[in-house]
Amino acid sequence: MISAVYSTPDFITLSSFPQAIAHIDCDAFFASCEQARDPSLKGRPVVTGKERGIVSCASYEAKACGVARAVRLGDVKRLCPDAVILASDYELYSIYSCRLFEIMRRFTPEVEEYSIDEAFCDLTGLRRMYRTSYEEIALKIKQSIQKELDITVSVGLSLSKSLAKICSKQHKPDGFTVLPGERLHIFLETIALERVCGFGPNTVALLEKQGIKTVFDYICRPREFAQKMLGKIGIELWHELRGVKVYPVKTEVKESYLSISKTKTFSPASGNREFVKAQLMRNLESAFIKLRRHGLSTRCLAVFLKKNDFTCAGIEARINRHSASTLDFTRVCAELFAQVFCAGVLYRASGVILSDILKEGNDHNDLFEDPVRVERLRKLSEAADRINDTYGKHTLHIASTEPLASKMAHPRNSLAWRKTELLKGETFRKRLGIPLLKL
């Protein structure tokens, strides 16, 4: 574990921790979960993404050989002949993710699940409860995760979310960086603008043209400069990087969506019309399952197909009312597919995007809509959800997805270990929510 504390005689603020925000970021999360599940993989270069044909995640042993995300698996073997290439087991990663957040919530109720493998924790005010420093509290969270899950995390502790996120990236993997307020100066003098979450390539290019090279250069400029150059986001980040918390730690579960998308990559690429259509319809089913789970409805559907050369073709359509029923959109999806699909072309992925989303109950039926049919489709979707919740996702599915039941033979169609090593009573679609260790 690497620990760092920065000191300087030049102060931006004299307050060490007016508030304390920790950013906890897992190290090579998918690969770390595989190594925790199978101890024989510890210390070996592990790569996940066999089912996609490209690297989804690489352990730090693999990264040391030059393996990076999105590298083709053929290149992985050239860069790292000893690499262990595994199919991704997203159920396993979800289980570890849930346990990760549960450990954090034992220390503080204010936890924001930022992604599957990272979170922000507000530790402000907890020193009295634990009778120790914020640094010790953050360190205990880190140690608890490593002890209970057998994975390492990198932790950044500072005054705001933006600063904490910069700190967590400072000494990966297994890093621990603490940045009190009175020590901002020397730390930020060495931090490039690209390290700030919110500064993209174009923003960095713009600031560099103004003679700004580091984060410290940026926060030394007046507030009016930040507003003139970058507007509202510029002012917010100017405050955040000076240790003034602007972005709160959001503990509520996300329930509102501007859009919902589902994409699936084929293994291998296919020009079979029925197979590609089946993949698209499966994406449609998955998107509507998520839509209903959050009590939402939609009226706009976009579909796209990605060719083997990575170019895409897509089209969208709207129906005359909002709906959460999959069957309201199956015919529309099939018609859009017919317009986009080209015979003789190999496709590697398909996807759907639902937009114009509202909460169910806020939508209104069209004057000429058959209310009996609308209610019938709604109840049918609810019944399908209950069956699939009991027996596994997609147990009850649209008939046009049936070609997916028998996948084409291909090395990349290998299943994750947990999907083949079933306990008594388990099925491919319905398994116990525990990480079965491979001992």
Image (spheres, helix red, strand yellow):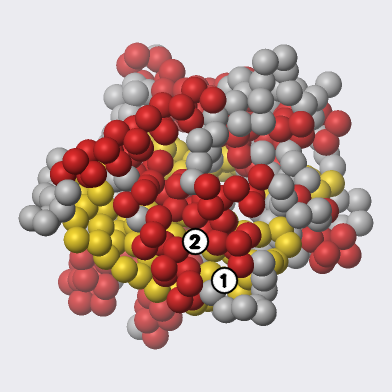
Q: Residue reaching furthest left?
A: 367
SS of the residue at dot 1? strand
Q: Residue reaching furthest right?
A: 81
Which residue does the numbered mark 2 point to in the structure image? Answer: 351
- Picture quadrant of residue 427: top right
Q: Foreground: 217 or 429?
A: 429
Residue pictured at 63% horizontal, 60% vertical: 275
Under mark 2, the amino acid is Gly
SS of the residue at dot 2? strand
Q: Which mark is residue 372?
A: none
Quick one: quadrant of the C terminus? Answer: top right
Residue pictured at 26% horizontal, 73% vertical: 230
Residues at marks 1 and 2 touching, judged by CB atoms closer than 8 Å: yes
Quick one: quadrant of the N terminus? Answer: top right
Drawn side of residue 394 relative to residue 376, left or right: right
**In this view of the protein, can residue 334 be seen by the observer?**
yes
Residue 206, x across and y down, in percent: 37, 81
Residue 145, x across and y down, in percent: 58, 26
Residue pictured at 91% horizontal, 56% vertical: 81
Q: Is residue 198 above or below residue 57?
A: below
Q: CA distance from mark 1 to mark 2?
A: 8 Å
Q: Residues within 10 Å of mark 2 (few under 14, many from 20)?
A: many
Drawn side of residue 31 relative to residue 19, left or right: right
Q: Is residue 426 above or below residue 183?
A: above
Q: Residues within 10 Å of mark 1 (few under 14, many from 20)?
A: many
Residue pictured at 57% horizontal, 79% vertical: 342
Mark earlier in primary sequence (1, 2): 1
Under mark 1, the amino acid is Lys
Q: Is residue 396 above or below residue 439?
A: below
Which residue does the numbered mark 1 point to in the structure image? Answer: 306
Q: Residue reaching furthest bottom?
A: 209
Residue 419, x across and y down, in percent: 71, 32
